[in-house]
Image (cartoon, rainbow, N blue to C red):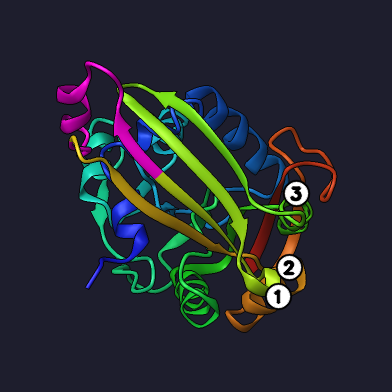
């Protein structure tokens, strides 16, 4: 039986594929969040980077002196995150290994949400609600689902590019009914770089997998959050603070009600 896509896609090669999502972008994102709602609304509460990956946001949080903690399922990415200045936990976001009400903020950044379908994604939000202390905030950095549907309405979009020692082919398409977006990804070593590619987990035969993210509209996200005791209190459309709907992303902030 094939392993779930999210256990394949977040391997050692992942930071190489998204090297353009760098520390400068992480700073822009984290500069925006406190303008939307305070990260330290609950004194003494931790700031949980949920799906922390290789730690680019964690490093910025640690430099700001915030009590940050990173959680991710990928051992390879947690290895890459070592040295970020924050404690790291290996765990599944559907079953958070944290005590209730211990967090002042939970961050789901760079679309670290929507991987599992409505029931399991609802369980993720319920866990976030339980982990937040009253008055704490969940920051959801999610793709603009309306824009994605419009972009792919006429059919799949494919591209080929190079990333480090890899040749990357990607094809994005809407799932039937438009309720999810899939991305077929094929990786091969670039010419003469077989050893460097192998060090990232991509052998000479290459690697193929499909990413899949459920496309929730804003009402669905608000309803899911509401069932977890979370109320939307702020939003933006990009990392510069543009109005919601005018940029490529949805930055949604929810507060844990008493």
**Residue under the image location 30 percent in, 23 percent down:** 190
Q: CA distance from mark 2 to mark 3?
A: 15 Å
**Residue position for label 3:** 151
Within 10 Å of disc 2 (Cα), the crowding (few <14, some 14-19, many 20+) is few
**Residue position for label 2:** 217
User: Which of these two is toward me, 7 or 221?
Assistant: 7
**Disc 3 element:** helix
Q: CA distance from mark 1 to mark 2?
A: 5 Å
**Residue under the image location 62 percent in, 83 percent down:** 227
Q: Quadrant of the C terminus?
A: bottom right
Q: Quadrant of residue 76?
A: top left
On the picture, is 15 further left or further right than 64?
left
**Residue position for label 1:** 220
User: Is 202 colored magenta in this rendering?
Assistant: yes
Q: Kindly tell me whether residue 257 is visible in this rendering.
A: no
The reply to whether callout 1 and callout 2 are in contact (CB within 8 Å) is yes
What segment carries the magenta color?
A: 186-203
Within 10 Å of disc 1 (Cα), the crowding (few <14, some 14-19, many 20+) is few
**Residue under the image location 45 percent in, 31 percent down:** 60
């Amino acid at each position: 039986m094939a392993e779930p896509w999210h256990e394949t896609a977040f391997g050692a090669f992942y930071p190489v594929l998204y090297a353009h999502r760098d520390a400068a972008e992480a700073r822009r994102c984290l500069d925006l969040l406190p303008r939307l709602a305070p990260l330290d609304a609950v004194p003494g509460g931790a700031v949980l980077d949920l799906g922390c990956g290789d730690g680019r946001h964690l490093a910025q949080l640690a430099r700001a002196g915030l009590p940050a903690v990173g959680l991710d399922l990928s051992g390879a990415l947690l290895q890459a995150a070592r040295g970020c200045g924050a404690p790291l936990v290996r765990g599944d976001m559907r079953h958070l290994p944290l005590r209730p009400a211990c967090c002042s903020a939970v961050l789901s950044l760079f679309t670290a949400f929507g991987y599992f379908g409505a029931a399991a994604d609802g369980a993720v939000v319920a866990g976030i609600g339980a982990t937040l202390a009253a008055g704490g905030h969940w920051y959801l950095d999610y793709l603009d689902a309306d824009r994605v549907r419009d972009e792919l309405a006429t059919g799949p979009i494919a591209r080929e590019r190079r990333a480090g020692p890899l040749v990357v082919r990607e094809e994005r398409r809407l799932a039937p009914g438009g309720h999810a977006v899939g991305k077929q990804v094929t990786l091969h070593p670039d010419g003469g770089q077989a050893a460097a590619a192998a060090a990232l987990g991509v052998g000479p035969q290459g690697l193929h997998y499909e990413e899949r993210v459920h496309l929730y509209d804003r009402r669905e996200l608000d309803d899911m959050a509401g069932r977890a005791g979370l109320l939307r209190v702020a939003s933006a459309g990009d990392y510069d603070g543009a109005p919601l709907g005018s940029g490529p992303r949805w930055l949604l902030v929810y507060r844990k009600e008493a």
